[in-house]
Amino acid sequence: MMLLASITNPGHGFRAIDWIVLAAYFAILAVSGYLFTRRKSENSEDYFLGSRSMPSWAVAVSIVATSLSAVTFVGAPELAYKGNLTYLATNIGMIIAAFVIAILFIPRFYQTRSASIYEFLETRFGPPARKGASITFLIGRVLASGARVYAGAIPASMVLFGIEDGIKPAYLIAAIAVLTFVGIVYTLAGGIRSVIWADVLQFAILIGAALSAIIILINAIDATLNEVITELRTGMSDGSSKLTVLDTGLDFTSPFTLPACIIGFTILGIGSYGTDQDLAQRMLTCKDAKHGARSVVAGILLGVPSVAVFLTLGLLLWVLYQRPHMTSIPNATEPDDSTRVFLHYILTQIPSGVRGLMMAGLFAAGLSSLNSAINAMSAAFISDIYKPWVDGAPTRATEKHLVRMGRIGVIVCGLLLGGFACTCIYWQSANDDTLINFALGVMGFAYAGLVGVFFCAIFTNRGTSSSVLAALIVGFLWMFLTQQFMYDHLGLLQSEPVASFYAIHFSWKLTIGAVLAFAVCSLGSRQDTARRAAPDAA
């Protein structure tokens, strides 16, 4: 009853026209989903790879839509509002990673002709390595995408239950349940093809909503551009500039220094786009390796201006709330929690109707991450674990059976993501971190081991199934044991040197973890050159 009363409470700023706009968004989503169900998936390659017929431009948009997620929609404005533009420099590492993946990873993935990128590891190390990597991905994807679902649930909860009640755990859990249900139903419709085209639609809504907010904020500022820039140049608490893009310092605790962006975020980018089935699966839907390579490079390049849009929002919100004398809204009330600064602005300052568009953009960001994750998880499970198992049985599974099991996998994976998203409500509070740093840090659990293993497979002729499994375990344990809550709440070696280490940014912990995993994997015996998988010319 409490939840029902909160939904009908008009105090949270949503009006009838906003609900109509939001309903129109879901109607468009439903119609597009229906159109995709008209073409039935007859085999697993069609369901999970779209028969390798997707245009590279659509795949590129899908990649950037998924990588942005609700975390960027909510978290990037927060970073610029509280700090500066150094988060934009993380794209340096991501662009480096894109070319590494395009040149070294994608040709090898296409050679296997599998729906899973982990079949490449089987050609190098044997079937146990493939299964181990796939299981690591599944666990890591539950963590990473669960965090993204949690981020998407924050605005959904604030819309449904009010600005104040919406951040309470009970209401957040209800919002997570709604997002999870919608995401599962839509993904069941048409497999990866529906996911990619839905991402294209939702990216347009996402960016359109952000640009609309920028236009409204600019119109609310009475000062000249030079006056605004002058204020931003001294707007940090220490008097430094909020327009700083490159931080050339060597502070390992600072999140977005130039060394961290070049080294740590290159490793993160390779993990995200090259060893993670969620994003890599999209590249495999193109007709060949060349088009797959183009899609990842284009997708990451498209992410640069997209992130810049949300950072610009944060700067404009800072002007609105911290320099109200420069605006036509002198009585704007700043939110108590900077994490909610953009959401607070949407629900208190944006005109009715446009407010509905903004929230549609937020829902689009949340659903984009959820749809792709559960499809990729199901694809990895069916290709790497279930199909090899049933192929060893007396009767091989038919393609129709595999598609049916893939849909069951979508449901199970969606429920797992929703369950972990509920856990994130309490985890982020324990880590006391920004939304973006929290979400990125959780991603590293699987990436440390996977990056180390893939590097060993590509750059050396060493490694066995046993060393692969050991490397995956070492990478995962390293990332878990270096979480801040392990030090804060478990009393681990309470000393100044240990405390200093735990304070370093997650990108450096990920880099160390990847190096450790690479070293462990390389301890495996040397293999004959003939056993190593060499990619066909792309």
Image (cartoon, rainbow, N blue to C red):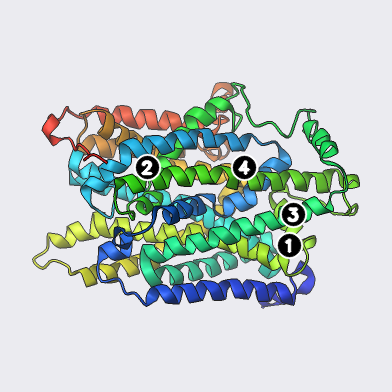
Which sits earlier in the primary sequence, circle 4 or circle 3?
3
Q: Amino acid at mark 3?
A: Ile
Query: Which mark is in front, 4 or 2?
Result: 2
Residue at the image position 55 percent from the left and 32 percent from the top: 505
Kindly check if marks 1 and 2 are in contact, taking CB atoms under 8 A apart as contact. Answer: no
Kindly check if marks 3 and 2 are in contact, taking CB atoms under 8 A apart as contact. Answer: no
Q: How many discs appear?
A: 4
| View extreme (left): residue | 394
Query: On the image, numbered disc 3 is attached to which residue?
Result: 215
Q: Nearer the viewer, residue 431 or 84?
A: 84
Q: Amino acid at mark 2?
A: Gly
For mark 1, give the secondary structure: loop
For mark 3, give the secondary structure: helix
Which sits earlier in the primary sequence, circle 1 or circle 2?
1
Residue at the image position 43 percent from the left and 58 percent from the top: 372
Residue at the image position 18 percent from the left and 42 percent from the top: 123
Compared to 246, does 326 lie above or below?
below
Query: On the image, numbered disc 4 is attached to which residue?
Result: 433
